Image: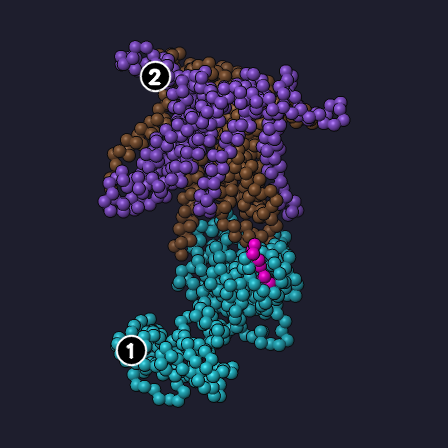
Amino acid sequence: MNKDLHKPDKAWQAPDEAPFIQIEGVSKDFDGYLAVNNIDLNIYKGELFAILGASGCGKTTLLRMLAGFETPSAGRILIDGVDMTSIPPYERPVNMMFQSYAVFPHMNVDKNIAYGLKKEGLAGSEITQRVSEILELVQLSEFAKRKPHQLSGGQRQRVALARALVKKPKLLLLDEPLAALDKKLREHTQYELMNIQDQTGVTFMVVTHDQDEAMILSSRLAVMQEGQVIQTGTPREVYEFPCNRYVADFFGTINLFNTQVIETNNEVIKTRCNELDAILFASSPDSHEIDSGITIAVRPEKINLSREKPSAEKLSVLQGVVWDLGYYGNLSIYRVKTKSGQIIQASAQNRIRSATRSLEWDDEVYLSWEPTSSVVLTE
Amino acid sequence: MDIVWRRFVILAPYLWLLIFFLAPFAIVFKISFSDPLVASPPFTPLFTRSESIDFAFFFTLDNYRFLLEDNLYWISYFKSLKIAFISTLLCLLISYPMAYAMARAAPGWKNILLFLVILPFWTSFLLRVYAWMSILSTNGLINNSLMSLGIIEQPLKLLYTDFAVYLGIVYSYLPFMILPLYANLEKLNLDYMEAAADLGGRPLIVFRDVTLPLSLPGIIAGSLLVFIPAIGEFVIPSLLGGLDSLMIGRTLYEEFFGNRDWPMSAAVATILLLILILPMMVFQHYQSPQEQQEA
Amino acid sequence: MKKAYPGFLISVLCFGYAFLYVPIVLLIVNSFNDSRIVSVWGGFSFRWYANLFENQQIIDAALLSLRIAFISATFATLMGTLAGLALTRMGRFKGRVLFTGMIAAPLAMPEVITGLSLLLLFVSLQDFIGWPANRGAMTITIGHITFSMAYVAVIVQSRLSSMDQSLEEAAMDLGGRPFRVTLDITLPLIAPAMLSGWLLAFTLSLDDLVIASFVSGPGSSTLPMWIFSKIRLGVTPDINALASIIILIVSIGVGVAGWLILKQEKQRRTESQLKLSE
């Protein structure tokens, strides 16, 4: 499956495209506790946008304000140009898939899905038709007469999705859509969700604490911390160019080094790391003052491992011994201990099929990486 | 429509309780300051819309003065507290081993045992008290068996005594003590006790040092559930108690129906309410964190 | 690992349940005793039951009690459910603390106080606005609604606070207005709790002596009032028969209700297990 399939037009890059959902300076104050603090976000039509953050970061409150269950203390929410800030949930063109799925236990699948259409006052024949269409889309046609307790977790999730989608909302909110599913089902469902979003063209907004989920699903994502959005971008942008240590750490593993700038030259800066007693290089478009302290961050997969000392110019090189190694099938993870005692993590793809390892415990290794592989963090 | 619905949900029960629960207390309080009258209703109104332009205002502290001076009321209040207190202790002594035994029973048995404790609670209170009347009476089961065994010559006076009142209260309120104790002991992890035993504690020491302190919330809840209603008990002292078993609930009833002194009964009720406020607040205090835990 | 159940605990249970049940069993046995003296067995007989059904007073009192219990349980369920909804689903409102207090207080209030205060209210109301014109079934029903709605409110409230509120939010999200959502989602889901509440209110009403004695008027004597006036004077065999019938009916009722609740619990448990297993 092509990852870019469901986002053919990068609307957020087109200058003349108007945002479909506008969140303007929205805050929510719960008795002096600022759950959401002055958030601005623009989301474009057809996007699958993810809000990512640890629990308690305010992402659920933001979602509930979009659905209409909470009223913002300040700011506005516009959908398709219409101010929704004080519209009650039952009058918004927004639907939500709840974390618990909230499938009505006393109604069968059919009635669950038809509920929203009945409230719109549609004719019976149209309801029947739309319900059967959506059941087909989520592959639940043969379960139409079942009660929720006769369904599996994955099936209930699809009922919840169908029930929200059948309303043809302008925005579909998904609260931790995969959290209640087990690992295997989760992977399958991820692709299914992307597929359905692609087919219906509805704008999705997913709230999750799981960075893998956010990265795989979303066209763009926003990272939240303590009620604020700290970075917005495509998954690749956020992973490769995290704006601070929190974001860098949040997305997978990263090695961090505290260094001092020695020299700057043509977007490549030369730094000294006292803890490692080593010279490290990094590329950075920004200018840095000599002697200023910066953090250099390197992802494990950007680090090369070799037995011989590499000798290219402007390469950051460290020496150490293999302290720990983990075999994950597709890749191996090495934890290398430097002379000064720091543990650095590096990973390598297992491209060649072999029963023996090329590197063993206690082997001496050199770690090296290109300046462009380093990220400079000033915070 | 939606605002109307919201208002209805809140206001309907709210107004009902204001009119039929709170307002009556205000009236009781008011009437406790008025003079008795041989009339219907037998009290002088505190306010009247009579001939005078202003509301006439009758206000007397006589009822409270009388209440202070007459020993009868003091004895009743004191006796109610004493009987309620001792009955609560007795209930606790019987209930604790029972609740403990229930909590340690096999899972399949627990529901049955619990059901058997709850069942009598649903059957008529009056009839359960009545059942003891025929057991305790002069030619009742106890006296007849003891006499036919030759243990006693003359029937014992069991019915219409304080003993019968204690028995009746303990019997009737036993489920109220067992249920919170059971709920508490059932949640207690037996591992604690086994760990304590494993560390060399003898059973009684383990009980004193581990089980008892951990079950304190259940003990408090159960004790208050017995103590509070037992103070105001009317049916048990009037059916099982003797003429001298003057509990305050009974005194109030007699004052009202016997002497038809409504202002005096109102004063008695006001004081009773004041006595009950403290244990009720303690109960509320212990109840709320428990509820939060469950939620 | 698993230890034998201690013999001491078995004897505790035997003693405890004997204490709870022996008086009731004796009562039932005695109801078939032909002898007028309770502890002397005079042969098996149905004569007290026959007596009972010939006594028009008892039948009238029983019918009145049942009527009052039915009406007051129904209204108490309605009011108690509204109160439960107000406390769990309506957010904040003015006077919420007082409201919570008024729901909790009737549960601990001595009946003599509730009865006395209600009577004084009715008398004062009659004085001021001429209603209620006379006391009887109507005033007893109002009294019973007032104290049993608190019990219903507590039951409904505990069910509502354990219920996933996102069910109602989902319905609202799908376009249901609050009133419709209550009808479509909330009420069907709390129906079992409302039924338990109704049964409790019904039993409390049937059982009440004190409040009814205070607020009833001439000519309206409920079954407990009638029983009380009889047993006040001592033990009478017809009451044994009446008690046996009541105990039988109640046991069946409670048994069925308990079975229903247990079945529902089981279903809820399997549902949550289903959720966990995936």
Q: Is residue C30 magenta?
A: no
Would you say C190 lies left or right of B5 here? left
Residue appearing at x 39%, y 85% in the figure: A315
Q: Position of residue B45 (x, y in %)?
A: 66, 23
Would you say B190 lies left or right of A39 here? left
Alpha carbon separation for disc pair 2 and 1: 91 Å
Q: Position of residue B233 (x, y in %)?
A: 47, 25
Residue A139 higher or lower than C216, as above or below: below
Residue appearing at x 54%, y 22% in the figure: B67
Amino acid marked by disc 2: Leu
Labels 2 and 1 in the same subunit: no
Question: Element at badge 1?
Answer: strand
Which residue is labeled 1 in the image? A321
Q: Residue C149: in sight, yes or no? A: yes
Q: Nearer the viewer, mark 2 or mark 1?
A: 1
What color was chain B assigned in the picture?
purple
Compare residues A91 and A164 and report the one nearer the observer. A91
Amino acid marked by disc 1: Val
Q: Main secondary structure of the magenta part?
A: strand
Please identify the quarter of the rendering in which residue B153 is found.
top left
Residue C186 higher or lower than B31, as above or below: below
Chain assigned cyan: A
Q: Decide: marks 2, 1 in contact (CB < 8 A)?
A: no
The span shown in magenta is A26-32
* Chain letter of disc 1 in the image: A
Marking on residue B141 = 2
**Display colour scheme:** by chain
Question: Element at badge 2?
Answer: helix
